[in-house]
Amino acid sequence: MTAKTTHNQILFGVTGSIAAYKAPHIVRRLKQKNYDVQVVLTHGGARFTTPLTLSTVSGKPVLQSMWDDQNTWHNHVMLAKQSSLLLIAPASANCLAKLAHGQCDEMLYALYLSATCPVVVAPAMDLDMWKHASVQRNVAQLKKDGVFILEPASGALASGLEGKGRLPEVEEVVSFMEQVLQQSIQNS
């Protein structure tokens, strides 16, 4: 069975980074641009933003588990196949490691492994974490795997330090995602 896709179906993953506070603003901007957004929130992401906030701005229930409240299975394979693009913003260091190594302990990572659409990842973490050799190895592996990486911005960080590690502003995240989506459409 094949899944029909349009070019406006976005899976939006939110992981455990303080930058998750920008996630509702990203969803709102995507909705303003007429994208159909399905938010997928990791357990870590739920510590920084709420499913209620994200479902309110997306207009859809937020997926957090492979199972819903009625113990019904969410078909991650079909969700991934019906999507035009998977955007993960912010992507924590933990998220990057799981993506790079194929770990699949949450709904977001099952979707990533099932995705045949372009994947855009926007890392956000403290500057020393971003510079760490293991994080850079994971980023290099993801690039090698065909993932589009939107590098962190520089500026004031939640730790009080200054440097590279911030999630870029909403417009930059959305613009980068649209460039990747447009390129994908042109190549199909």
Image: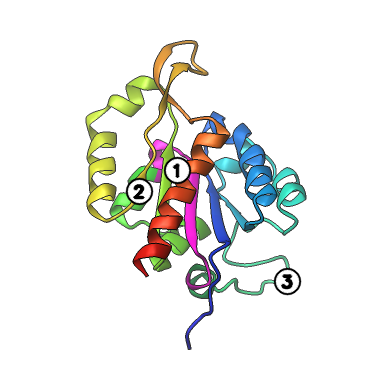
Position of residue 1 relative to residue 159, above or below, is below
Q: Distance between the Cα atoms at labels 3 and 2?
A: 36 Å
Amino acid type shown at disc 2: Phe
Which numbered disc flags the more N-terminal residue, 2 or 1?
A: 2
Q: Quadrant of residue 114?
A: bottom left
Counting every numbered tag in the picture gives 3
Position of residue 101 relative to residue 129, above or below, is below
Q: Residue 70: which numbered mark, if any?
A: 3
Q: Residue 152: which numbered mark, if any?
A: none
Residue 138: x and y, percent?
27, 43
Residue 21: x and y, percent?
62, 32
Residue 72: x and y, percent?
66, 74
Which numbered disc flags the more N-terminal residue, 1 or 3?
A: 3
Is 46 one of the magenta-colored residues? no
Amino acid type shown at disc 1: Phe
Pointer 2 residue: 148
Q: Quadrant of the C terminus?
A: bottom left
Left or right: where does residue 54 sit relative to residue 172? right
Amino acid type shown at disc 3: Gln
Q: Do the residues under discs 2 and 1 have CB atoms within 8 angstroms?
A: yes
Q: Indicate the colouring scheme.
A: rainbow
Q: Do the residues under discs 1 and 3 have CB atoms within 8 angstroms?
A: no
Pointer 1 residue: 176
Q: Which residue is found at the position 25% from the left and 35% from the top?
A: 136
Q: Nearer the viewer, mark 2 or mark 1?
A: 1
Q: Distance between the Cα atoms at labels 2 and 1?
A: 9 Å
Tell me the magenta residue range. 81-95
Left or right: where does residue 7 sit relative to residue 136? right
The residue positioned farthest toward the bottom in the image shown:
1
Q: Which residue is found at the position 71% from the left and 52% from the top?
A: 58
Left or right: where does residue 84 sit relative to residue 37? left
